[in-house]
Image (cartoon, rainbow, N blue to C red):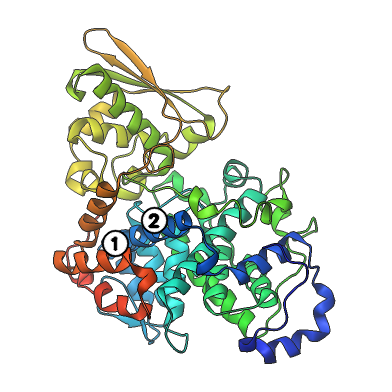
């Protein structure tokens, strides 16, 4: 799909493109961002590989399930109270409606609120892209087919991950204190909405580059369990939608924002190791939605491999957690900084705590959402297990290396293991039955089980939907009237 030249003005934006004709000199057809914008504007369902379509459908359903559960969170409740603009976009898991931008914000917060949304994209691409796209549908005249939705979601995942990789990758970008879900996610949402809106390459490029002005999100939440992290996904979804709408009206984005210039994205969000060519390397061959992973545990993804290692060691040794005397961890400095705190107080802090995830697995037999309820966080047995852990930074480890988990059993036996890729990844996939069970459990927090079943079946065949507005009746619920999960 590599372009020989930029396409002509798209019909929907003919007036806008006439206004832009005097600035066509800004466009360099072979610059990485322009090649990416062209590719995104040309993505169609018919050209997508079957495995990309199936993977995308899984992530749409998984994100919606996470958001329906998140509608019961304290963060989503607060976000709903800020959504005062009337409109036709549904707030998922409730009967309320608001403007498209506010819906993208609230639903994005809900999708990320309980730490069960996907990872491995921008980082949390699903919670950014899917709320933005479904909110945008409320403003698009005429029906939007399921096939158009899939193509738009693929576009968002493609841009979000490519921008992160071009910015040096997760460790370089996030290691400076930026939360890539917010910084790169806004561009992912902008690309997805641009694709849904039928933008040509020029307007798509402007949507993506304008979204850099909405890039934000700092890791400072890590120090006190702040709920700010949950807002990053919603703000990126809302910012990307706004960027696309502005581009559609003719507002030009900064065409040199991905060049090595003062004020450019890479200089601002990383000091070195940036690779602009990654914006367009392998387009149509390396589909970035396939890089995204599902999350079976209600914690930061940084804790998942350790939980898997604990599970494996217990299974392989034929023992249960009661036989453990002590857990030892060797981990990278970056993982220690992100997830090394022994937290069991506020939910947001506990979800970022690797020791808590392991302790919850030992005490309750699971690191799933139920283990993060207030009464379980207050269980003294959890704190006792965490207090007995030994965490040691290994300076020879790379930032993204997974930890080495060692179990010392009461009879003196020691066993160790590292799980290179956690459950939910391509190397260790969640089984279809587990994905379905996760969706059912989460969706039932805001809608009735029978409704959740019908929603699941509709999402499983979403490519056959003539108009995605048919989803709305199954996304409405009473999560805003149920007890808050915190």
| Disc 1 and disc 2 in contact, CB within 8 angstroms | yes
Q: Residue at x 64, y 79 (%)?
A: 247
The quadrant of the rendering that contains the C terminus is: bottom left
Query: Which quadrant of the figure has residue 66?
Result: bottom left
Q: Which label number is shown at residue 74?
A: 1
Residue located 33% across and 73% down the image: 80
Residue ID at (29%, 51%): 435
One can see residue 446 in this view: no
Q: Is residue 75 in sight in this rendering?
A: yes
In the depicted structure, whether residue 110 falls above or below residue 25: above
Q: Which mark is on residue 331?
A: none
Q: Depth check: give the residue in front, 201 or 44.
A: 44
Q: Quadrant of the N terminus?
A: bottom right
Tell me if residue 445 comes above or below residue 394 in the rendering.
below
Residue lying furthest right: 25
User: Residue 371: percent from the left, percent from the top?
Assistant: 22, 43
Residue occupying the far top of the picture: 412
What residue does disc 2 label?
227
Q: Is residue 417 left or right of residue 433?
A: right
């Amino acid at each position: 799909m590599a372009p020989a030249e930029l396409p002509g003005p798209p019909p929907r934006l003919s007036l806008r493109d006439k206004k832009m004709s005097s600035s066509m000199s800004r466009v360099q057809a072979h610059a990485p961002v322009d090649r990416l914008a062209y590719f995104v504007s040309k993505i169609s369902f018919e050209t997508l590989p079957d495995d990309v379509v199936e993977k995308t459908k899984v992530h749409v359903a998984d994100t919606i399930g996470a958001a329906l559960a998140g509608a019961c969170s304290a963060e989503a409740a607060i976000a709903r109270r800020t959504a005062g603009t009337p409109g036709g976009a549904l707030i998922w898991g409730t009967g309320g409606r608001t403007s498209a931008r506010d819906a993208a914000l609230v639903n994005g917060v809900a999708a990320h609120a309980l730490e069960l949304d996907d990872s491995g994209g921008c980082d949390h691409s699903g919670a950014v892209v899917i709320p933005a796209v479904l909110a945008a549908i409320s403003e698009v005249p005429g029906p939007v087919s399921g096939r158009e939705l899939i193509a738009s979601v693929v576009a968002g995942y493609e841009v979000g991950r490519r921008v992160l990789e071009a910015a040096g990758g997760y460790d370089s970008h996030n290691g400076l204190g930026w939360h890539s879900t917010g910084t790169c996610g806004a561009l992912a949402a902008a690309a997805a909405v641009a694709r849904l809106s039928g933008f040509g390459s020029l307007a798509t490029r402007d949507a993506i580059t304008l979204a850099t002005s909405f890039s934000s999100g700092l890791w400072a939440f890590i120090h006190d369990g702040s709920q700010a992290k949950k807002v990053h996904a919603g703000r990126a979804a809302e910012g990307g939608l706004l960027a696309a709408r502005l581009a559609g009206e003719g507002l030009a984005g900064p065409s040199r924002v991905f060049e090595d210039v003062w004020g450019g994205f890479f200089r601002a969000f990383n000091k070195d190791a940036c690779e602009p060519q990654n914006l367009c390397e392998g387009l149509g061959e390396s589909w970035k939605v396939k890089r995204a992973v599902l999350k079976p545990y209600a914690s930061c993804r940084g804790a998942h491999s350790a939980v898997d290692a604990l599970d494996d060691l217990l299974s392989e040794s034929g023992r249960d957690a009661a036989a453990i005397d002590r857990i030892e961890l060797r981990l990278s400095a970056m993982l220690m900084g992100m997830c090394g705190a022994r937290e069991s107080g506020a939910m947001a802090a506990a979800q970022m705590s690797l020791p808590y995830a392991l302790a919850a697995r030992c005490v309750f037999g699971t690191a799933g959402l139920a283990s993060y309820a207030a009464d379980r966080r207050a269980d003294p047995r959890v704190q006792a297990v965490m207090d007995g852990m030994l965490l040691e930074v290994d300076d020879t480890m790379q930032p993204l290396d997974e930890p080495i988990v060692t179990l010392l059993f009461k009879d003196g036996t020691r066993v160790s293991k590292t799980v290179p890729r956690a459950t939910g990844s391509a190397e260790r996939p969640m089984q279809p039955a587990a994905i379905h069970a996760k969706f059912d459990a989460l969706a039932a927090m805001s809608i009735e089980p029978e409704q959740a079943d019908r929603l699941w079946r509709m999402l499983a065949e979403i490519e056959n939907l003539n108009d995605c507005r048919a989803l709305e009746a199954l996304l409405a619920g009473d999560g805003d009237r149920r007890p808050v999960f915190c």
